[in-house]
Image: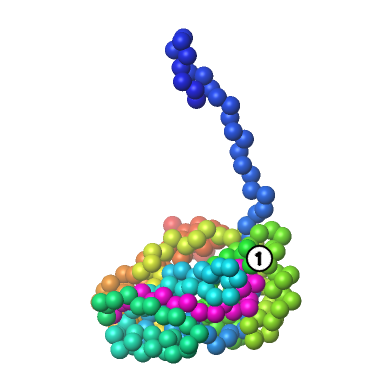
Amino acid sequence: MRDPGRGGRWERGPVEPALEPREALVGVALSVPPVTHWLRRLTEWPGLSSRLLACQPLPPSGTRAVHLLELAGPEQEIRAAVSSVAHSPSRTVALSPDARDRVLLRVVSRTGSSCRALFRSGGICRTCRFRTPRGPDGRVRWEILTTRPPRPLPEMEQRAWSRGGAGALRSLRNPPPYSQLTGRQEEALRCADRLGYFSVPRRVGLGAVAGALGISRSSAAELLRRGVAVMIRSLDGPRLSTAPAPPGARG
């Protein structure tokens, strides 16, 4: 609104037209074969919990990318894992100082062909194909965000998926909102899943999860319960409480 004139009245200025997006964002889920990668090695490192905080291609060509990770666990396991990553001369590693059971790790490494194709076409990784657990069929689910029509797919489908054969399109839908999990809840859930806490039959107990996270059993149990509750509430469709009661059940 404009300043009041001599009569003391406010004058409404011209209203700017609302900007409308030219393209819609869409979520794409691909089933891809697992490949050997240092990120997967860190993810599956025994007794170690890792979290990928950032992954960004470096200009101008995007053939290299910078990764920022948080590692948590026993000091000797962290040292061994970092040494394994730094073993390759093609990777540049930097570590946060004065830390023992929890460190920040910065790694600059080569970008895989599938990731490079995704970056160049404007897509964004929603999950990391090198950190997602393998499914029952031995493949991993890679979720990306792109525009409609999905521009990255034609280019990427013409290329081999990083020494592993072609990827299969599993779903194409509007992306759900990002999870409301806190960083600690996500870390605890991923750690518990990797160790086998959610497996049937269960491979490890709560104590093993707490030990890998470096926290008490009660804190680990609270993180897992709260994280599972957040995930249940974020499920698409009706809430569990709205499901019809079985015959004869009391209200």
In the rendered structure, does residue 55 fall within the stretch colored magenta?
no
How many residues crowd mark 1 within 10 Å: few (<14), some (14–19), many (20+)?
some
Residue drawn at the location 47% of the way across and 89% of the way down = 88
Of 11 and 83, nearer the camera is 83
Residue drawn at the location 44% of the way across and 77% of the way down = 107
Which of the colour schemes (rainbow, by chain, secondary structure, one colour) is used? rainbow
**213 to 226, vertically: above or below:** below
Q: What is the magenta range?
A: 101-119
Q: x%, y% of residue 181?
A: 42, 64
| Label 1 secondary element | loop
Of 134 and 245, nearer the camera is 134
In the rendered structure, does residue 113 fall within the stretch colored magenta?
yes
**Could you say which quadrant of the image residue 121 lies in?**
bottom right
**Could you say which quadrant of the image residue 113 lies in?**
bottom right
Q: x%, y% of residue 171?
A: 66, 68
As shown in the figure, which amino acid type bears the numbered disc 1? Answer: Ser
Q: How many marks?
A: 1
Is 18 on the left or on the right of 80, as rendered? right
Residue drawn at the location 44% of the way across and 12% of the way down = 8
